[in-house]
Image (tube, rainbow, N blue to C red):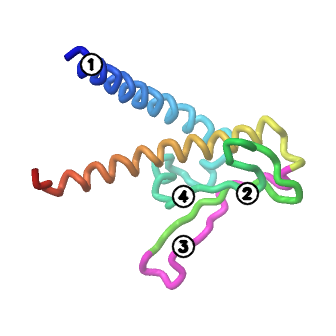
Amino acid sequence: MSSALDRLKNLTNKISSYETARKDNLKILKILYTKIDIDKKVENFSDLFDFKAINLSGASLLRDSLGEIKKGKYLQVLAISYDKTAVQKSKNISLAYFGKAENVDVVLKDMVVEFIIRYRFEKSFMTLSNYYDIIGTFKADE
């Protein structure tokens, strides 16, 4: 019986830590949103999450090479919007342009990379919540 109770405690702790991490992430994401001037293109913070995705050119987002500059490329934050009624369904929108990646201040570049990762973290929670709600509409045979 204690094994089941231990598993429940571990699960509860994990869920609690995810929620705490999410709350902290949103606070920092809002700060970065203004620090790297995304607020100049997207006036309302919540509107960021209307985009299908936000990507980065000019620096790596891979775990093994996170933040590594791509020589000859430009550091730019790109949002992908999606309109299913349009002829061209998806569209890239520049949210911020910083110039040649190798010329961008390292602190600024790191903030941009952090912004993208934190955005994706929150977006994944939103996606999870959406699918959780959708699953709730099904009545599983038991």
Decide: marks 2, 3 in contact (CB < 8 A)? Answer: no
Q: Secondary structure at mark 2?
A: strand
Image vertical order of residue 89 relative to residue 118, above or below: below
The stretch drawn in magenta includes residue 99: yes
At x 54% / y 47%, what residue is drawn? Answer: 120
Q: Mark 2 or mark 1, which is nearer to you?
A: 1
| Sequence-wise first label, 4 or 3 | 4
Q: Which residue is mark 3?
A: 90
Task: Give the magenta range.
Answer: 84-101
Depth check, front residue: 141 or 61: 141
Q: Secondary structure at mark 1?
A: helix
Q: Which residue is mark 4?
A: 53
**Where is residue 57, by image quadrant?**
bottom right
Q: What label sits on residue 57 in the rendered view?
A: 2
23 vs 135, left or right, is right
Depth check, front residue: 134 or 14: 14
Image vertical order of residue 13 relative to residue 50, above or below: above
Name, please, the residue furthest toward the left: 142
Q: CA distance from mark 4 to mark 3?
A: 11 Å
Q: What label sits on residue 3 in the rendered view?
A: 1
